[in-house]
Every structure is written in structure tokens, then in C-alpha cells.
Image (tube, rainbow, N blue to C red):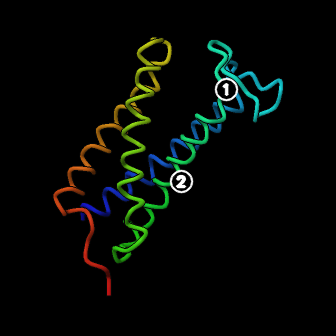
Amino acid sequence: MAGLAVGIFMLIMGTGIAGLWTVDILRSPEVDRSRGLLRARDRSSGSLLVPHWLAEYGTACLLLAGGAGLTGRLAPGAWSWLVPLALGALAYTSLNSLGWVLADRGRAAYGIPMALGLAGALVAAALLLSGNLFAAPVA
């Protein structure tokens, strides 16, 4: 049961991360796309955005793959390593991005899914470490 709940959480977070970043990339006035997406920069800091986007979309892909394995109740195997990798990436990106939210109160609405992502990743990691995450495979 815990594996199913964590799997659903991972699927929701993976979909949310990919969706929010896609909308932000296409619509945000803070993204300077004038030289193309591969050279896009943050208007306020001048930072190149592609490395950050790769990390965010990579996290989303790990969450989706690990979540699919958990919700599909696949027998633990090589795919199982995706779960702790995805949860670690989610915890990191959520905590790191909370700093971005706290720096500008106008971004407060983004803080809610980030805080939920961090809390959920920590709870799921505790379940993983306790041995309660992977269910017996369906025969």
C-alpha cells in the first residue's frame, strides 16, 4: 500500500515538474529566449538556463519512471534504483528551489508544491529505508 501511495505521489510530482517548467519556459517574461532555447538566460541573473532545465526534466523523468514501477507493482529489480535516485533529486530540487521562492515573495505560490515535494520525498525516503516501500510482486 505504501508503494502505491509513493508511486502516485511520484507520478504527480513528475508530471507537475515537467508541466510547470514547460509553461514557464514558453511564457515567462523572465526567460530570455531571443537567442534560442539552448542559449536562453534568466533575465535577472543572466544565468544560462539549459543546465537547470536538464536537471529539472531529468528529475521529472526519474519520478515518472520510478512512480510507474511502483504503481505497476513490478517486482523489485534494476528499475528499483530509479526510486531512491528520483526521491533524492526531488528533495534536492525542492529544497534548492525554496531558496528561489524565499528570495522573492512574489513567487510564494511556487513554494507550496516545492514544500510538498520536499516533505513527500523525505517521508518516502523514510519508507524506503524502513523496508516498507516495495510490495511483493503481483503474481
Q: Seen in the image, is 70 located left or right of residue 21?
A: left
Q: Quadrant of the C terminus?
A: bottom left
Query: For the residue labelled by badge 1, is the local secondary structure a helix, a strand or a loop?
Result: loop
The residue shown at (32%, 56%) is 6
- Residue 19 position, x and y percent, is 58, 42
Q: Quadrant of the N terminus?
A: bottom left
Residue count near mark 1 (Cα–Cα under 10 Å), binned few <14, some 14–19, many ≥20: some
The residue shown at (25%, 62%) is 133
- Residue 82 position, x and y percent, is 42, 60
Q: Nearer the viewer, residue 92 or 73?
A: 92
Q: Which mark is residue 48?
A: 1
User: According to the image, label 2 marks what residue?
Assistant: 61
Q: CA distance from mark 2 to mark 1?
A: 21 Å
Q: Quadrant of residue 95?
A: top left
Precedes in sequence: disc 2 or disc 1: 1
Q: Quadrant of residue 80?
A: bottom left
Q: Quadrant of residue 71?
A: bottom left
Does 96 sit above or below residue 130?
above
Q: Which mark is residue 35?
A: none
Q: Amino acid at mark 1?
A: Leu
Query: For the residue labelled by badge 2, is the local secondary structure a helix, a strand or a loop?
Result: helix
Q: Nearer the viewer, residue 3 or 75?
A: 75
- Residue 18 position, x and y percent, is 57, 44
- Residue 73 position, x and y percent, is 35, 73
Does 135 sit above or below residue 125?
below
Does 26 sit above or below residue 82?
above
